[in-house]
Amino acid sequence: MNKLFALLLVVCVSQSKAFTQDALYISTNKAKFVVGEQVMYKVTRFGEERTEDEPNPVFTDLVAPNGQIIQTKSALDNPDAKHFFALPDSLKTGVYRMVSNSKDAAQAVKTIHVYALELEDPSPQKASTIQAKSRGGIFASGQNNKVVVRVLDGSGAGLQSKGTLVNSADSLVQYLDTDANGIVAFDLTPTDSLYKVRFGQEAIELKPVKAALSVDFQKVNQSVLVKLKRESEGIEPVEILLNGESLVKSVFPEKADTLSIMIPSRKLTYGIHEIGVSYKASLDRKYTYFNQPDAGRKLYLNTIVASNNEEVEYVIEDASGQIEYLDVSIIDKDYASVGNFYEEFYFDHAGLDLQLVENRDFEAYLIFFGGDVQKSENANRLSAEQYHGVLSYRENFPFDELSVLNLTTMKALDIRCESITGIHDFERVAGNNSQIFPFHFTTYLQPIEQAEFEETVKYRYPPLKSSIQLTDDDVAFVKEYDTQRNINLSFQNNKKVEASLPKADFTYNLEDYDVPNTMIDMINYVVKYVTVVKNKGGEPELSMYRYMSTYKYRGSPLIFLDDLPVYDKRTVLNLNPKDISRVEVRNSYEANGHLGNFSLNGSVSFYLKDGVDNPLKDAYKDLPVLQRCQNLNKKNVESEFAPDFRHQLYWNAKVEKNKGSFWVDLKTSDLSTSYQILVTAHMKDGTVMQDQSLLVVQ
């Protein structure tokens, strides 16, 4: 008994590794978004662990329906990292994709619906093409058949529509309603010589043929029982193939027309398999079979009843001790999308809205798409030219050559002193809603060129042949969001943090001086501690003496013009000195300390008179602005009287165990409604199980 148990355990572990080998999966906080929101996401890597000495960047793209990359973010492979994309107001309503790629891993795709605030009634689409496939590849007369129909519009996108199935006499057999992917399935035992599927003006014929063998499948634990029934003589031997390889050949027992063949679990790793049945004088019949861990496993989640604005602790127990971590989402029941992890994992890149078509007939999807699904590494995307971003600088420059000045607070960020593994870390450290001025530095920490942080990539994905067909619920969803946003704005703290430099060591009000006609003369004869000298190339540059010292700094000081850092000193030297109102000199460590390595050579600030245009003003409009990762589902103030229209109370893609249990702390909203608690448990053996419960707010 003990030996048998050990053997089964080895098989299970082997299966889980086969499923998880070299693959990515994207989790998002929800499936429906409105422009202006942030798509919060986490990328999970299944497969062998990577060491810290072998960082593996993950590139995630936000892709428009036409295949254009709107935004891209790269980050070093970090199992704990969570990221976000801010959805610009300019986006149009449509089905967008989140696509993640990494070396030695299959590409992962997650589709989301994005709605513009101004919804336009979509032009009505008509059925242009009807396709049909039968289970096993044969529409057999006298046998029960599962037939899958897909209806496409003129662009090749699946069309949600209504149609009919009629017989040769044009009599109605049944009505057909396709889902958002244009899929509908029905079971039929043909008793007529001809059937037609009609959608609008389009129709397709189904003609039954006589088949010599009936085939059926039954799942027994993780094994599959193939049940065969002979309808004609002379068809033996019967061969069963698994994923194109012969598994067994057999004949029917004497005086029997039925035969059962078991495909053992050790042959069926988690995923999609093609089971072929071949027999004499017949075309091979191919069946797509999907094997996943026992979907009946439960987490036994509790239902919670709470009051408005109540602090709630939701505890998920791990009685078996086999859960590694949880992905938990608590979202308004009307907006919740209950998905199947394994179905989405294997069909994520098929251009289908799996997570938005609930109660789908997944076997129908397997029949229609299963043979075309191939998860693989996207070598073209990985080799595409990637521009800017923290990772690109980490690869090409030492981090001690890169610093950033926050123009909102006038504080510096020395990247060499921070734990920066990707653009998400940079945004976190640099601050919220901040305009930044990034520089590369030379050996003596002189600014040599402006650095770019907004990431771009030269690549385009194939267009997505899927479109949103607006419903009344969609309109209500967008309307409620707009109301929520306006109410939130009324409660925001509008205090603006002004940029300010520390107190200067020396200040020169030029109205007290006879100002020379050139900036060079003004600096040399009016401003103490600062001079203009020529460098080895004969170009003028600023030089500064240390505070209360006769020694100079080794490099040029940092230059400001109206509190804006100057990259090219000629911008200042070409000014009319009569337009300058005052000059501030900071040549002590105390006056420059918060500017980091920008000011190791001191700093000098020039201020223009009122009414004089700053030549840098227009240029600075194009500098990167860091947008705070807002969660518009949360209150902007702590007041319990502030209105709250949250539809998502909680999302955490990696809730870890604490004292033997998983704890979720949240505060309920002002809304009296029901929330769906969606939990995905990632098990220690590599498998995944899902469960759900309710949070009722009274």
Image (cartoon, grey):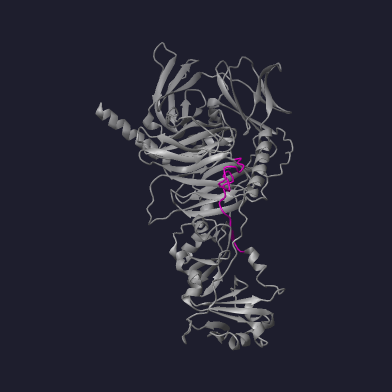
Rendered location of residue 504, percent (x, y): 55, 76
Q: Quadrant of residue 141?
A: top right
Q: Residue at x 42, y 55 (%)?
A: 55
Instruction: Tell me if residue 548 can be seen.
Output: yes
Task: Look at the magenta stretch and give its main secondary structure.
Answer: loop
Quadrant of the drawing holding the C terminus: top right
Rendered location of residue 627, percent (x, y): 58, 55
In the rendered image, residue 624 lying in the magenta stretch gets the answer: yes
Q: Which residues are magenta?
A: 623-645
Vertical position of residue 698 compared to residue 20: above or below: above
Quadrant of the drawing holding the N terminus: top left
Vertical position of residue 456 compared to residue 322: above or below: below
Rendered location of residue 293, percent (x, y): 42, 31
- Depth check: 512 or 629 in front? 512
Rendered location of residue 553, percent (x, y): 48, 81
- Depth check: 650 or 615 in front? 650
Point out the residue furthest to the left here. Answer: 2
Instruction: Tell me if residue 469 can be seen.
Output: no
Total labels drawn: 0
Q: Quadrant of residue 174?
A: top right
Q: Residue at x 42, y 12 (%)?
A: 256
Vertical position of residue 231 compared to residue 273: above or below: above
